[in-house]
């Protein structure tokens, strides 16, 4: 796919905050609730014996003068509690700031029974005085117990494995749920046979595999294969990631490895699956960094455990990584990981089968052809295909439909490859013409070059970082690329810039992405593939293989001289120059088709590859003057638009 790039800043989502766990709330609610309960009980004790009607001091004196008071109890703080002649209990308060010396004679004159007491009693006074100290001491004791529990239980939990244990009845994934990859299934099916009947191997004197490591790009289903093995064998499945062993404390990772294998022995026969094993299985003796001692101890313990358990114990270790070049050689030797199974990107047939699996339970229109979609998605992994089907379903929901049409899958593919279509990113009329000419150049050269892949779609609608795109679909899955194919590929890559030079007489910034891709292809032709007649059959491939799923980068250290580098640069420039001149010559020869195709693109915005071929066949029909693309300078045209 070729197109015009438009830079833009990415938007990073803000991670949601994590709410406190219920266990943390209960640890604090217990002491707080106990404190509230204690205060409530104390309040009940201090208010015991009080009750009835509360009178002001004036009303109290009036009741005494009327002879309605039968008995009173007065404490040293002036609090009064008493009983009326009709048996009603009451309370009042004598104001100590006033002269109330006449109150006692008045009470005696009306024959009121008087009782004098001190406020509260000894028990209540003791509780009130001791309560703050008791609360402080209790709180400190509770904190101490929590700390001791964290030290004893927490540190013991530190050394425990964080493996997720799935018992025998839990795994439901089978090999039938994994589409394609028949060779990989055959490789790991022997692991299932060993777990089902280990005595067969023992009787024949064959040693069962101790470990199987699956290597492949991200999203190819390595974890799914491990679950399928567990489901087929109907044995416990202990799943853990490599990062779960890494801690800042030395020795914790090794302890977790021991605990993991102890759990596996208790549940034997069983499978131990370590995802992203490169987190702990990296080469030893590398550059010293923080935590290197802990990582090496963890790796040493893993090596000892894999070399130490009984061969007939029924434990198989499976691992997955997309960085096999970083693993320690001791981990990959026979006796530990006996087999290295490569899980590559699916081919066209396998992609069709994977789409069928992910499409189960969804409603598709009759025009949906999974074979055609598989052909249009070279380089897609299983995870990419699952995302493609999900995006198509979302697109159908946006249109208020429950049935997924072929157009939804095409839109989803553009969404995955190019990005979201920006309706607000409208192009100026002059820019639309420039993009149409650019993409017409790509499309025509892809049709004219003998070894180029056929054109499937051409569009000038902005999407993501591209202002337009020309999509090419290979007729078959390619594994080898000839020099003729690569030269045609360079010609098609430079077709957009060549079209701008033919029509407008100058280039633009829209060819930046095309130039970068073409330069990379030409560099690899000269430096890696030995396809240069000047440099000869010499290849300077990268000394260290790239991680699976990553693009090849520059060599960390050049294994050749500056003179060789100068020769490489000259050959790259020669290849690119020849490809550009070839593209310009072809487009000048077919200038009528270029103008007609650019006009069609400007009017329709998106066209199929069949229209490109039809335009070439009808090239002899000249365009009217008013329908031709303006051949003035590109800079002047865009300048007028602004």
Image: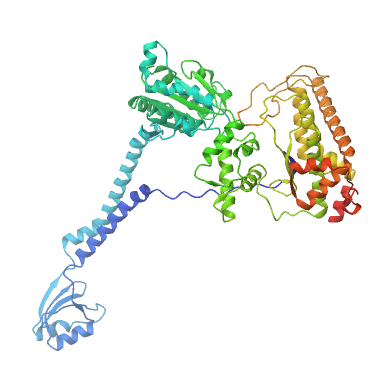
Image side of residue 323 versus residue 334, left or right: right
Q: Looking at the image, is 215 positioned above or below residue 16?
A: above
Q: Looking at the image, is 384 positioned above or below residue 277?
A: below
Task: Tell me if residue 246 can be seen.
Answer: no
Q: Looking at the image, is 371 positioned above or below residue 99?
A: above
Give the residue displayed 80% in from the left and 49% down from the top.
Answer: 600
Task: Tell me if residue 438 can be seen.
Answer: yes
- Whole-percent x and y of residue 346? 59, 31
- Whole-percent x and y of residue 634? 87, 48
Give the number of marks: 0
- Residue most extreme to the top: 205
Q: Looking at the image, is 307 positioned above or below residue 396?
A: above
Most foreground residue, 308 or 175: 175
Position of the C terminus, as image quadrant, is bottom right
Most foreground residue, 402 or 61: 402
Most foreground residue, 227 or 196: 196
Picture quarter containing residue 62?
bottom left
- Whole-percent x and y of residue 12? 60, 47
Position of the N terminus, as image quadrant, is top right
Give the residue displayed 40% in from the left and 27% down from the top.
Answer: 233
Image side of residue 262 versus residue 610, left or right: left
Name the image colouring: rainbow
């Amino acid at each position: 796919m070729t197109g015009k790039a438009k830079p833009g800043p990415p938007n990073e989502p803000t991670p949601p905050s994590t709410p406190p766990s219920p266990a943390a709330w209960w640890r604090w609610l217990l002491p707080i609730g106990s404190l509230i309960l204690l205060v409530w009980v104390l309040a009940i004790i201090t208010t015991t014996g009080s009750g009835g009607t509360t009178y002001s001091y004036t009303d109290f004196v009036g009741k005494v003068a009327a002879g309605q008071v039968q008995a009173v109890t007065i404490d040293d703080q002036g609090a009064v509690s008493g009983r009326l002649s009709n048996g009603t209990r009451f309370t009042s308060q004598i104001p100590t700031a006033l002269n109330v010396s006449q109150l006692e004679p008045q009470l005696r004159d009306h024959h009121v029974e008087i009782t004098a007491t001190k406020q509260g009693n000894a028990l209540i006074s003791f509780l009130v005085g001791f309560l703050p100290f008791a609360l402080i001491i209790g709180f400190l004791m509770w904190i101490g117990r929590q700390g001791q529990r964290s030290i004893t239980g927490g540190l013991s939990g530190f050394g425990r494995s964080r493996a997720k244990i799935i018992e025998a009845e839990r795994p439901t994934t089978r090999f039938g749920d994994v589409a394609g990859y028949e060779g990989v299934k055959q490789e790991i099916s022997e692991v299932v046979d060993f777990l089902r009947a280990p005595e067969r191997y023992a009787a024949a004197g064959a040693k069962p595999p101790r470990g199987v490591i699956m290597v492949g790009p991200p999203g190819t289903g390595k974890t799914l294969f491990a679950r399928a093995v567990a489901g087929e064998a109907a044995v416990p499945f202990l799943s853990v990631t490599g990062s779960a062993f890494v801690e800042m404390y030395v020795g914790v990772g090794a302890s977790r490895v021991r605990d993991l294998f102890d759990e596996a022995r208790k549940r034997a026969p069983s499978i131990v699956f370590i995802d992203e094993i490169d987190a702990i299985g990296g080469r030893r003796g590398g550059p010293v960094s923080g935590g290197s001692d802990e990582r090496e101890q963890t790796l040493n313990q893993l090596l000892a455990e894999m070399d130490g358990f009984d061969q007939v114990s029924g434990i198989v270790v499976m691992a997955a990584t997309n960085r096999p070049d970083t693993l320690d050689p001791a981990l990959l030797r026979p006796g530990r990981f006996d087999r290295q199974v490569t899980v590559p990107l699916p081919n066209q047939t396998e992609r069709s089968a994977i789409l069928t699996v992910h499409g189960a339970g969804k409603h598709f229109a009759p025009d949906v052809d999974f074979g055609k979609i598989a052909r249009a998605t070279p380089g897609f992994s299983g995870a990419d295909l699952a995302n493609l089907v999900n995006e198509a379903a979302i697109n159908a929901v946006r249109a208020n439909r429950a049935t997924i049409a072929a157009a939804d899958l095409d839109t989803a593919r553009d969404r995955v490859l190019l990005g979201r279509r920006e309706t607000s990113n409208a192009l100026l009329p002059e820019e639309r013409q420039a993009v149409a000419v650019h993409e017409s150049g790509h499309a025509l050269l892809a049709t004219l070059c003998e070894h180029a892949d056929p054109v499937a779609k051409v569009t000038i609608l902005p999407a993501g970082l591209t202002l337009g795109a020309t999509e090419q679909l290979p007729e078959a899955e390619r594994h080898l690329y000839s020099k003729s194919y690569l030269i045609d590929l360079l010609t098609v890559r430079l077709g957009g810039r060549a079209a701008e030079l033919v029509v407008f007489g100058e280039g633009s910034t829209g060819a930046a992405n095309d130039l970068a891709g073409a330069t990379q292809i030409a560099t690899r032709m000269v430096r890696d593939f030995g396809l240069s007649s000047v440099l000869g059959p010499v290849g300077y491939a990268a000394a260290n293989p790239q991680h699976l799923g990553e693009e090849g980068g520059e060599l960390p250290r050049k294994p050749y001289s500056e003179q060789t580098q100068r020769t490489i640069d000259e050959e790259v420039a020669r290849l690119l120059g020849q490809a550009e001149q070839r593209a310009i010559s072809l487009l000048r020869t077919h200038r009528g088709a270029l103008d007609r195709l650019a006009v069609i693109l400007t009017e329709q915005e998106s066209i199929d590859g069949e229209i490109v071929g039809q335009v070439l066949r009808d090239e002899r029909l000249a365009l009217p003057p008013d329908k031709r693309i303006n051949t003035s300078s590109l800079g002047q045209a865009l300048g007028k638009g602004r």
